[in-house]
Image (cartoon, grey):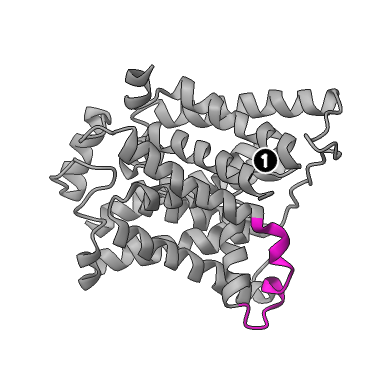
Amino acid sequence: MKNGKYLVLGALFGIILTKSEVISWWRIQEMFRFQSFHMYGVIGSAVVVGMISIQLIKRNRLKTINGEEISIADKKYSHGTWIGGTIFGLGWALTGACPGPLFAQLGSGVGMGAVLVMILAALAGTWTYSALREKLPR
Amino acid sequence: MIDFLQQPWPWYVAGPLIGLTVPALLLVGNKALGISSALRHVCAACVPAGIPFLTYNWRAEIWNLVFVVGIALGGFIGYQLLGHPDTIAISPETVRDLKAEMGLTDFTGLLPRELFALENLSNWKGWVFLVLGGFLIGFGTRYAGGCTSGHAISGLSNLQWVSLVAVIGFFVGGLLMTWVIYPRLF
């Protein structure tokens, strides 16, 4: 199965998110109240390591394991970047989760029913955005 | 080693490992780390309803859905198999403030049971935290073009100024909820 490697990488990513407790509502509250360095340390060091890695890939023109070129699409700006970002932030502080942690929470089995409701609501949110997309400021 | 795996991991172990996921996905298949897109692919696969934004070849993005299934599997391994503390060691100031401001009493578990129980759907609190909260995540991330993984980790790592704008938005929203809206909810 050619997608098997993504299952493995996803599982490793899920284990890291879970063991570092960034999937916990308590940790997110601590972060937004500036009462612990934990979340800032996690996000900050992740970005530094990611940045160095991408620079190394670009400078050495590394290819994928199958010999394909590596290219990363630029993110495009629209007013949605900050409006949508702020809307997401409101939801992040409410649920204490972003999309990745929602799925890790589901797997953890903690409060499964409640987590399932949040995931279904998130799908409804994405669907509603898609339906209204043309009418929203961009 | 086993001992270490079972303890909660400190930021200086977890953060760099999360960062390494970015080059791992690029080197394995030229994929950019991003999870909120999976929500769009599920909508496109299940309820496209003729919406242009949901009419595309989502099958080409199946790797993203497989990655998300992996995350759930990782949640199971990390929490149930590798073990977890009964109470997450958050700062005493946070405990004090949550007791005083939100009236929380049970600090055990990954999520506060008093807020994240299915039974809460019988009152407004459950609808705000579970339904509205989830909805804002799905709506906001797609409108912004990414979430904490796509913008904060992947985007900032690739020096995208657009992602910096998005991340500032994430924090403006989060701080607004925590400092302005929460005190009015409780």
* Whole-percent x, y for residue B2 in the image: 35, 20
Q: Chain of mark 1?
A: B
Residue placed furthest toward the left? B105
Lateral position of residue B184 relative to residue A103, left or right:
left
Residue drawn at (46%, 33%) of the image: A16
Under mark 1, the amino acid is Gly
Quadrant including the N terminus of chain B: top left
Viewer-side residue, A68 vs B35: A68
Residue pointed to by mark 1 = B155
Whether residue B160 can be seen here? no
**A73 to A37, vertically: above or below:** below
**A39 to A23, vertically: above or below:** above
Viewer-side residue, B86 vs B136: B86
Whether residue A72 can be seen here? yes
Which contiguous range is marked in magenta?
B48-62
Viewer-side residue, B136 vs B69: B69
Q: Quadrant of residue A83?
A: bottom right
* Whole-percent x, y for residue A94 in the image: 36, 54
Q: Quadrant of residue A44?
A: top right
Residue drawn at (44%, 24%) of the image: B11
Lateral position of residue B21 relative to residue B1, left or right:
right
* Whole-percent x, y for residue B35 in the image: 57, 51
Residue placed furthest toward the front? A1
Residue drawn at (57%, 56%) of the image: B141
* Whole-percent x, y for residue B64 in the image: 62, 53
* SS for callout 1: helix
